[in-house]
Amino acid sequence: MVPWLKSTRALRLVFIAFTLVVAWIGFQLGTHRHTGVLRTLVKAKHFLSQASITREQQQRSASAPAAPQHSVNLSWKPSTSAVASYNVYRRGTLGVVKLNSQPVTATSYVDRSVLAGQTYFYLIKAVNAKGTESTASNEIRADIPSK
């Protein structure tokens, strides 16, 4: 055999091996998203798709009618004892919660923090001038419509 033919074959084998290595690296980079470049591209794609979804949701919510705002109007008879104020409590899925941050001096209260489709139970406690609460009133049930 001619010596240069042997070297051409060797060059061909090296070229084929090099091509296979480059193809393998490309395959690994394409299938395994562990490189910084691919991770950045995936994050950018995710960000752009989320931005598109958010824009569509804003357009839909702008054109859709607002959901009805629910509230519960409570009123009670004044206490026959010397009362300085009242505290309003609500029992729901989170337990019993005092609703008023300031003493209620009237005999009515509006709870605007109710959620559609929920059931709540309300009770009132009278508070004297020393800040002592009375026993609780009977509970009143309020079923909030789901729509």
Image (tube, rainbow, N blue to C red):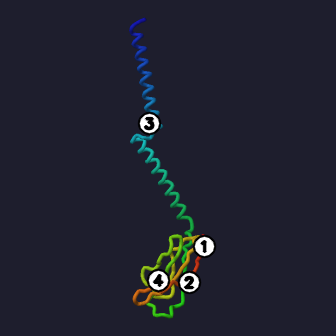
Residue highlighted by disc 2: 138
Disc 1 residue type (three-letter): Pro
**Quadrant occupied by the N terminus:** top left
Q: Is residue 18 above or below residue 54?
A: above
The answer for how far apart the CA atoms under marks 1 and 4 are is: 25 Å
Residue in the picture at 44% in, 47% down = 43
Q: Secondary structure at mark 2?
A: loop
Residue 16's spot in the image, x, y percent? Answer: 44, 21
Residue 52's spot in the image, x, y percent? Answer: 49, 54
Disc 4 residue type (three-letter): Asn
Q: Residues within 10 Å of mark 4 (few under 14, many from 20)?
A: many
Residue highlighted by disc 1: 145
Mark closer to the observer (1, 2): 2
Q: Please give the count of numbered marks on the rendered protein.
A: 4
The answer for how far apart the CA atoms under marks 3 and 1 are is: 55 Å
Residue in the picture at 51% in, 61% down = 58
Residue highlighted by disc 3: 29
Q: Residue 118 vs residue 126: left or right?
A: right
The answer for how far apart the CA atoms under marks 2 and 3 are is: 69 Å
**Residue 88 seen in this snapshot:** yes
Residue highlighted by disc 4: 87
**Residue 147 seen in this snapshot:** no
Closest to the observer: 93 or 116? 93
Q: Residues within 10 Å of mark 2 (few under 14, many from 20)?
A: few
